[in-house]
């Protein structure tokens, strides 16, 4: 049920072989000396810019690294709050903490993405921005999110780690916010094993992102794209290597056809299941823009959802979600408010813990949706007959459960 990982083959091998022949595994210099604009890293960045319609892309070492780079570029530091959906991956929380900020958890709605109304509820004088996660192939409802954020002077960072290739109102997800990130981890749409990308329209944010990713440096290659204006500051090392870039370049070329195929499989699956009274599908803000590799439906009760999952699994239908995402309130570091900084972490100002906003009971809608959902993954190697069979099994088991 994979995506890019299932298509690794001749194109990747050809590119990686070229890197070895060049004897230059580092994008900026090496024995073979393949500098900009011929390095694979710089070519991946141009491909990312073209795909998203943005001015600047920066290849980095991972999606998590991309989040830290973007948050650093946006200036997040101690005392700053960043709104994130409670239903999100570890990195969304940890990246904010790692740059010194405080993640503020928000409910999701029936899209399984950030509920736009949470921005008004959660904004305080310390709020700097909103981290929007496009969860599992479906972009969030960006129009109201962008409007509410702008009214409050907040930036928007799009986490497009799980939805590369998706669109919202005719434009690629990842092209709307002040910044965006992609992930090329093994289980993502495009994989390099580990890798990622930062996207922005802003020359200033691009320069700051480069500095954040490359020890505060801003090398000639990047100055040619956006003249140096920002002061140097201590950065970290999240640089993309040539091996990862070589694989990414081959993988990015397949995104369009891969998404088209998976969407077709999804349509077969949904047509087979049909509309069943009492069962609702995940709301997709733009029905033309999702990827389609994982469909979600909601049963009336958690018990009914579990019963369907159990019986479908017994019949050979795998309903394990493609990601290990679950509510942040259930994670050990939230339960214990533990951070790398110990007593100097961003949560120590709360007298009692768990504090309001970090308890499961503070997110009744998210937990209700999570307990009632059934995830139906579909991979790029599936056939239409397999998608139809999965749909028939689920239709039968759902109708059996609902009587």
Image (tube, rainbow, N blue to C red):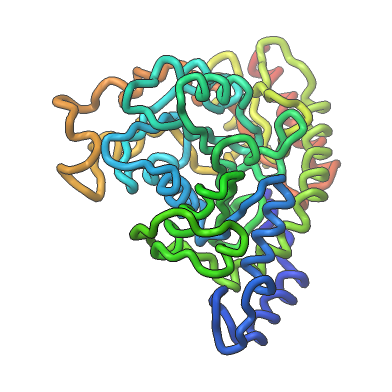
In the image shown, does 309 or 154 lie closer to the viewer? 154
User: With 403 as the anchor, is 350 left or right in this view?
Assistant: left
Residue 265 at x, y = what percent?
Answer: 81, 39
The spot of residue 232 in percent (x, y) is: 38, 59
Taking the spot 44% from the left edge, 43% from the top edge, the residue there is 74
Q: Residue at x 71, y 31 (%)?
A: 168
Total tally of numbered discs in the picture:
0
Eyeballing the image, is 307 above or below 32?
above
Q: Quadrant of the C terminus?
A: top right
**Picture layout, residue 93 above or below residue 231:** above
Residue 391 visible to the viewer: no
Give how far across and how far down residue 87 sits, in percent. Answer: 47, 31
- In the image, residue 86 above or below residue 209: above
Question: Residue at left 35%, top 23%?
Answer: 360
Give the residue displayed 67% in from the left and 62% down from the top: 44
Q: Is residue 109 above or below residue 23?
A: above
Q: Nearer the viewer, residue 338 or 347?
A: 347
Q: Nearer the viewer, residue 330 or 320?
A: 330
């Amino acid at each position: 049920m994979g995506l890019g990982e299932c298509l690794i083959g001749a194109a990747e091998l050809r590119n990686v072989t070229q890197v070895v022949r060049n004897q230059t595994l580092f994008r900026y210099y090496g024995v073979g000396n393949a500098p900009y604009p011929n390095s694979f890293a710089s070519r991946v960045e141009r491909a990312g810019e073209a795909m998203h319609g943005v001015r600047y892309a920066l290849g980095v070492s991972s999606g998590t690294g991309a989040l830290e780079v973007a948050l650093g570029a946006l200036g997040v530091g101690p005392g700053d709050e960043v709104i994130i959906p409670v239903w999100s991956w570890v990195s969304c929380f940890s990246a904010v903490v790692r740059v010194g900020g405080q993640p503020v958890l928000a409910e999701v709605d029936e899209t399984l993405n950030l509920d736009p109304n949470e921005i008004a509820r959660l904004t305080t004088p310390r709020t700097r921005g909103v981290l929007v996660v496009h969860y599992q192939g479906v972009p969030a409802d960006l129009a109201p999110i962008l409007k509410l954020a702008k009214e409050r002077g907040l930036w928007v960072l799009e986490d497009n780690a799980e939805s590369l290739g998706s669109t919202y109102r005719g434009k690629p997800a990842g092209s709307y916010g002040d910044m965006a990130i992609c992930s090329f981890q093994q289980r993502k749409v495009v994989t390099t094993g580990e890798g990622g990308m930062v996207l922005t329209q802003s020359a200033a944010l691009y320069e700051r992102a480069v500095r954040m990713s490359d020890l505060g440096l801003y090398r000639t290659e990047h100055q040619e794209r956006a003249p140096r204006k920002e002061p140097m500051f201590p950065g970290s090392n999240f640089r993309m290597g040539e091996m990862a870039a070589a694989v990414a370049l081959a993988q990015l070329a397949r995104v369009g056809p891969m998404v088209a195929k998976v969407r077709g499989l999804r349509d077969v699956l949904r047509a087979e299941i049909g509309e069943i009274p009492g069962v609702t599908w995940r709301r997709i803000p733009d029905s033309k823009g999702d990827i389609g590799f994982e469909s979600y439906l909601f049963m009336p009760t958690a018990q009914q959802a579990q019963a369907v999952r159990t019986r479908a699994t017994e019949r050979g239908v795998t309903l394990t979600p493609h990601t290990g995402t679950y509510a942040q309130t259930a994670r050990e570091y939230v339960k214990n408010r533990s951070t790398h900084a110990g007593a100097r972490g961003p949560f120590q100002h709360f007298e009692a813990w768990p504090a309001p906003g970090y308890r499961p009971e503070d997110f009744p809608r998210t937990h209700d949706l999570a307990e009632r959902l059934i995830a139906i993954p579909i991979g790029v190697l599936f056939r239409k007959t397999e998608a139809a069979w999965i749909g028939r099994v689920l239709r039968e088991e759902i109708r059996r459960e609902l009587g």
